[in-house]
Amino acid sequence: MKKQPQVTEQTRANLTQAFWSLYLERPIEKITVREITERAGYNRATFYLYYHDVYDLFEQLERDILTQVQVLVDEHLLAGDTLDFSQHMGLIVGMAQRFDGFMPRLIAGDPTFGERLKRIIAPLLDRFIIPERGLNAPEQEILREFYLSGLLAAINTWMGQVDRMPIDRLISLVVAVALPSEVRQA
């Protein structure tokens, strides 16, 4: 018997949503398959059709988010010859906003997630920002980490705020403060 793609997709989405609601409440070690399936309205056998365990579900979710970010960077942000930092930052923040509530928890809950995210975004800096500065390799490494850590921290802080400033204000604030004028106009 073949599964119907829409049913499979909906089942996975329901299991994922149940997991996230639990993960936002407590650490992954304290989440059971039983809790996920009860919250999603399925039995444990259904869960095991898609995942080996709670950690497998979590890894698949992280991989899916990182793949979406990688596609955004590769197909949209690195595709042009110039950097429109405001527009590109808007795409990055918009992507983070799609995972609202999850991104801060992912970065806080899995230290490797933030590092993997930085590796995906780093080519933007390496191509458009760092070469303009005329720095040696150790200086470039420090500046790259400064920008990447700052960007993730800013997005994370903004997402954690109850009364967030509008996304365009966040972007203009970061662009005005973090980038030299020659890069902003590139």
Image (cartoon, helix red, strand yellow):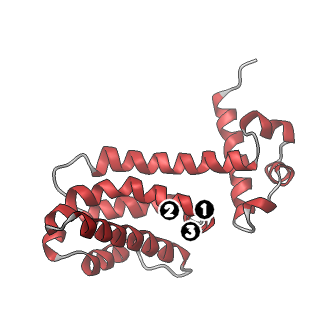
Residue furthest top as drawn: 1
Residue 154 % position (x, y): 43, 75
**Which of the image's four quarters has the N terminus?**
top right
Q: Earlier in the sequence, mark 2 or mark 3?
A: 3
Q: Give the residue at mark 3.
A: 104
The span from disc 2 to disc 1 (Cα, nearest Å) is: 7 Å
Q: Give the residue at mark 2.
A: 114
Closer to us: 78 or 171:
78
Residue at x-position 54% and y-position 59%:
112
Question: Which image quarter: residue 171?
Answer: bottom left
Looking at numbered disc 1 in the image, what kind of residue is underneath it? Asp
Q: Residues within 10 Å of mark 2 (few under 14, many from 20)?
A: many
Say which element carries label 3.
helix
143 relative position to 3: left or right = left
Q: Residues within 10 Å of mark 1 (few under 14, many from 20)?
A: few
Q: Is residue 185 visible?
A: no
